[in-house]
Image: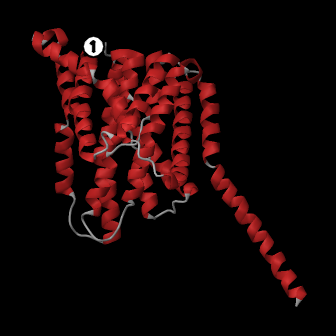
Amino acid sequence: MFEQSLVFVFLIFLGILLQKKIGDAKELKGLKVIILSVALPATIFIALLSIKYDSRYLFLPLGALLFNLLMLGLTWAGAPLFGMEKGSKQHRTAMMLVPSLAPGLSCFPFLMEFMGEDGLALGALADVGNKVFVLILLYLLAIHWYHKISAAETSGKGKLKSLIITMINEPINMVIIVALIMVTFGWNMSSLPGFLESSIARASMIMTPLILLFIGLSVRIKWREFRQLFFLLTWRSGIAFFLSALIILLAPALSPAVTVLLVVFPQSATSFWPYAHMTAVENMGDQPVFDTKMAISLLACSLPFSTLMILGVFSFREFFLNPWYLVGLGILITFVSVIPWMLRKIAAVRAASSAPAEQNTYQYAE
């Protein structure tokens, strides 16, 4: 298992080495389109038609949505620990990005490699709830902030309708809809014409190496911002581990596949969709609502960070499947993430306590 993880790390490193060859934004966008429009939909389609469904799995989308909403509230309360004052554009940016998940680029390839088609299909079902959150609810939140700050009277209904249409037309979502309809009628891959079945199977084979290379090619970290964003992502990861452990403890009868999914799915990278919403809102008026530069940096840091966390879970699966170990790990990581905030508080208290003493000394000297 660990050796397989090293193969993935090597492919990511190879992508980093290729940055000088494929560093243009348009080239990266083209690669991302191939992944999200061809390779990943083909793989999800095969997985959804292969899984043996259980009515209990219908709770996965709801569970993912509840996780998003809970993380939204926790980010509202926790982002100030990382220097993002409540009500600031940095605070709003963190609230848009931190609760979002992008399993397609950071989680699904590893679900496929380590858990097979069943694991990937479960992840695709959970992502339905996450898609509702990132595509609709976060856009409504962004529009709410825009109206609140700029006092604009224009309505966002037209844009919301456009986003809903985009969600339906997105290849991954279309694949999920078609696959679920086929499953309803009892069809599977063998029900398709032979050439189509073979084409879909071959398209799915390129998914994992393409995504790993894309991760390596996309790493663009500005080291000046790395410290703040690293601790924010560490906090996010620790909270996610802790919440996963609580669910596992409350539902000990879960299957091993669902248990692993509960651990790795919340560790997915932050989604690109909130950034798209923020950009759209920024273009609607002159009053800045979000910090889009910070958003880009957070996206760039999140993808490799989440990839390493998910690889760690699969490399040491038995450790992470123990809920009590997971509770301890979540608490430890969360504590480490707030150490800079604690040091700042201690420094502030010392400065406040030493100020009167210095003033008294000065007056005595006079």
Q: Nearer the viewer, residue 127 or 32?
A: 32
Q: Residue furthest bottom?
A: 366
Q: Nearer the viewer, residue 233 or 183?
A: 233
Identify the residue at image location x=52%, y=21%: 315
Decide: few, some or many residues near mark 1? Use Cα within 10 Å; few <14, some 14-19, many ≥20. Answer: some
By what rule are the colours in the image chosen?
secondary structure
The three-letter amino acid code for the residue at tag 1 is Ser
Q: Which secondary structure, mark 1?
A: helix
Q: Is residue 241 toward the left or the right of residue 124 in the image? A: right
Q: Residue 273, position in %: x, y? A: 31, 46
Q: Residue 303, position in %: x, y? A: 42, 39
Q: Residue furthest front?
A: 21
Q: Is residue 116 above or below residue 110?
A: above
Q: Is residue 144 toward the left or the right of residue 203 in the image? A: right
Residue 219 visible, this angle: yes
Image quadrant assignment for residue 185: top left
Q: Residue 27, position in %: x, y? A: 24, 41
Q: Nearer the viewer, residue 161 or 231?
A: 231
Residue 99 visible, this angle: no
Q: Which residue is identified by label 1?
A: 50
